[in-house]
Amino acid sequence: MIAEAAREAGIDLKGATVAVQGFGNVGANAALLARTLAGAEVVAVSDSRGGVLDRGGLDLPRLLAHKETTGKVTGFAGAETISNEALLELDVDILVPAALENAIDASNAGNVKAKIVAEFANGPVSNEADAILREKGVVLIPDLLCNGGGVVVSYFEMVQNLNMDHWDAGAIDARLQRMMTSTYRAVSETARRREFSLRQAAYTIAVRNVVEAMKARGWV
């Protein structure tokens, strides 16, 4: 999702700066994948006890070891301590709120400087903040898209089980890449054509697909 949004926005992910609020299972993996798959620089992360910032890029394996040992990201050698609130307002290319619902609301949305906000948490941007970010020209990738990959792979598992088949990791990754990429492009095209936000477009397509499936089954 982020790769497609960056491509459309003309952002080269290699060297792009990333801040992640929420360095748990979701946020930590998002940070690692941003670095290993795209070459992005993760400059700030946070957890419930505070955050750390290194504008040259955090050493994520060392930071993960530090968190495992201490139970927090703060106190990481060579990094500046920042608050969760300050992390959301950093001047970065990509902001990943992966912690709390409504972390970005009407009170702080105007201070968000990221070009792309990717909702890895459930509902981290309030409705009021959504409108503010759109007015500012920020690309907001809704949680419905960002969190879709896990559900897609669960579907792949179901298909394999029903067919008594087995796909290797490469096949899963390739199928997931195709489905997520095509989904983002369909949502983006709908958003452009109907002058919707990505969130509105995603829900429009989702509801339409449910209705079509219900018709095909003779339920309506």
Image (tube, grey):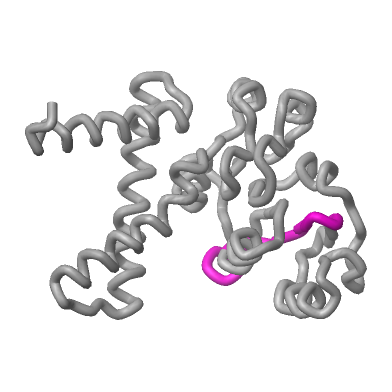
Left or right of 47 in this view: 28: left
Q: Nearer the viewer, residue 5 or 105?
A: 105
Q: Which residues are magenta?
A: 34-50
Q: How many marks?
A: 0
Estimate the x, y position of residue 163 in percent, counting from the top left: 13, 71
Left or right of 86 in this view: 140: left
Q: Nearer the viewer, residue 151 or 46?
A: 151
Q: Quadrant of the C terminus?
A: top left
- Magenta residue check for 46: yes
Estimate the x, y position of residue 45 in percent, counting from the top left: 76, 58
Estimate the x, y position of residue 139 in percent, counting from the top left: 56, 35
Estimate the x, y position of residue 22 in percent, counting from the top left: 71, 55
Q: Residue at x 57, y 44 (%)?
A: 122
Q: Residue at x 42, y 19 (%)?
A: 195
Q: Quadrant of residue 152?
A: bottom left
Q: Nearer the viewer, residue 116 or 166?
A: 166
Left or right of 27 in this view: 113: right
Q: Nearer the viewer, residue 60 or 38?
A: 60
- Magenta residue check for 33: no
Q: Residue at x 64, y 59 (%)?
A: 27
Q: Residue at x 88, y 64 (%)?
A: 74
In this rendering, the answer to whether 62 lies above or below 185 is: below
Q: Quadrant of residue 73?
A: bottom right
In this rendering, the answer to whether 159 lies above or below 85 is: below
Q: Quadrant of residue 176?
A: bottom left
